[in-house]
Amino acid sequence: MSLTLTGPVRLRGVTRRYGTRAALDGVDLDLGPGVTGLLGRNGAGKTTLMRCLATDLDPTSGELRLLGRDPGRTTERTEIRRRLGYLPQNPDFYPHFTAFALLDYMAVLKELGGRRARHDEVRRVLRQVGLYDRRHSRVRRLSGGMRQRLALASALMGDPDLLLLDEPTVGLDPEQRIRFRNLVSHLATRSTVVLSTHQIEDVAALCGHIVCLDGGRVVFDGAPGDLVDRARGHVWEGTGDPGIGLTSWRLPDGRHRVLTPETAGAPGPSFTAVEPTLEDAYLLLIGVSGTEGR
Amino acid sequence: MSGWHLTPAQAHDYAARRTDEITAMSVEAHLMHCPPCRSMLPADEEWLADGWASLRDVVDRPRRGVVETLLSHTGLRAETAKLLAATPRLYQAWLGSTVVVLIAALAAAHTLPRGSLMFVFLAPVVPLVGVALAYGRGIDPAHTLASVTPMAGQRLLFLRTCAVLVPALLLCTGAGLLLPHTVTAWDAIFWLLPALTLVSGSLLLGRMMHLSVASGVVGGLWVLGLILVSLSGQGVPLGVFAPQAQMWWGVLLATLVGALVFRVRVA
């Protein structure tokens, strides 16, 4: 029943410690169908959270429910894994395997039954990621982008209800990224997809829900529009020196784009407020929360 | 054209693949030149698609390696053979080094006074080292991908443990039979219960820490035990393999296996 009320992924007070350091610190989240973007700077706890959601890592404390089940119990964890697809950060493979053989091996591990059905599924996902023509190539002969797509194909096998993608567009060229976005948005019509990334453009293009982590804590949980609204009146463009201590960068036309925290006004008389982007809003969020945390 | 045509029954039998080979060849030769008879055959799109899919699968399927083929011939399920054959190359390195170590132990036993001691103390550790290298992060290159699949965890660990134990036990038994003073079968397998006990202890401890570390701890305890027995005044600690000690190994093994099964069941 709680599944219907709270969505396929529910975390309550989830903490994960490595020694004395808390990589996740009391995280509360409810994730439903569609694409959720997981943002945060390096070391914010994104990968730890993804590994907890992937049942690869147990939380030190707190309550975690995935697809209505408790991953802390062996039988329920196995049931979750049958409906889970996970693309880890920096995936590695057996280099002497062909792309087809590797996915066939993964399909056996995923308990996709019957040789013909298994092979058909391997072909399906190879086509989905555009690697069908390279199915007989050994993994060691594939480029970094192709290996990334191969790992994505592995995650897609079995049509998972919960798909976890950790930095999925690393190594993909622009054309492949567009293809990836189309694929993920198609999958999100029936699955819960969690996308951990530094690529704000991917989040802006795909996600209807954003979770931002900083120092192991959730600092934003909501719609992209709400995050952008927060930044309204804090993004400026103009000429002249924007001052020290503000986030700013030079634009191609020589002017500066400046992000000011909530307490500050315009950085100078020549600066005018402009419409914020999701990236502006994200930078303001982690900048402000980082300042507050110190 | 002979004027001969297929009867509806013949066409039906051919489509259902119930005709013998010679008749099928005659029918096919006739069908090539006779559109009316061809039209009697069912145009079953699903059947046709299935036929093409079968053909594609035969062409596309990955070629099985030597190990996978050999394992399949031993009667293992194709999926199990595939999982075992994919174990890391470190496993193959372990197998090679095991053979080298056992050959060295045999050479020592045949050439040095009290050289058999090398085999005596190494044999129980050989399977343990194999188990330490069988599974885990940092050992299996594809571990991050495999670790969140339904087969991961205990099932894959036990499968790979068996894959390590079987050759290890066979190799050690073979080496035991070649020892200079081996007379009975018992002389060749005196190390078996201690070896299985060490492996069980490692698997049980592996539920609390990385399997490699657990195996290291258990192996360390084994060496420490041998040293302590030596220092206690017995000289060479052969007493740990004596028939009365075997009973205690048996009890310890049963206890550890029971605890392991219990931990797996209640998890």
Image: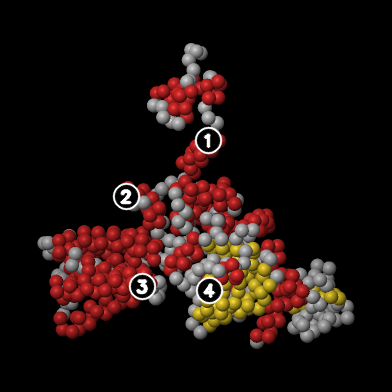
* Residue farthest to the left, as pictured: B183
> Between A46 and B113, which is closer to the camera in this rendering?
A46
Does residue A287 appear left or right of residue A24 in this picture?
right
Picture quadrant of residue A253: bottom right
Q: Which residue is mark 3?
A: B263
- Contact between marks 3 and 4 (CB within 8 A): the answer is no
Q: Secondary structure at mark 4?
A: strand
The furthest residue to the front: A1
How far across and down, in percent of the image, does residue A17 sit?
51, 80
Q: Secondary structure at mark 1?
A: helix
Residue picked out by circle 2: B75
- Give the mark, 3 or 2, whose residue is nearer the N terminus: 2
Disc sitting over residue B48 in the figure: 1
Number of numbered callouts drawn: 4
Give the farthest residue toward the top.
Answer: B2
User: Which numbered dot is residue A113?
Assistant: none
- Could you tell me if residue A140 is visible in this image? yes
Mark 3 and mark 4: Cα distance apart in space: 22 Å
Q: Chain of mark 3?
A: B
Q: Chain of mark 2?
A: B
Q: Residue at x 66, y 78 (%)?
A: A219
Say which quadrant the C terminus of chain B sits in. bottom left
Name the residue rendered at 47%, 20% in the picture. B7
Assign a secondary structure to mark 2. Answer: loop
Instruction: Give how far across and how far down residue A37 sits, in percent.
Output: 65, 68
Question: What kind of residue is marked 3?
Answer: Arg
Of badges 1 and 2, the one in the foreground is 1
Label 1 marks a residue whose chain is B
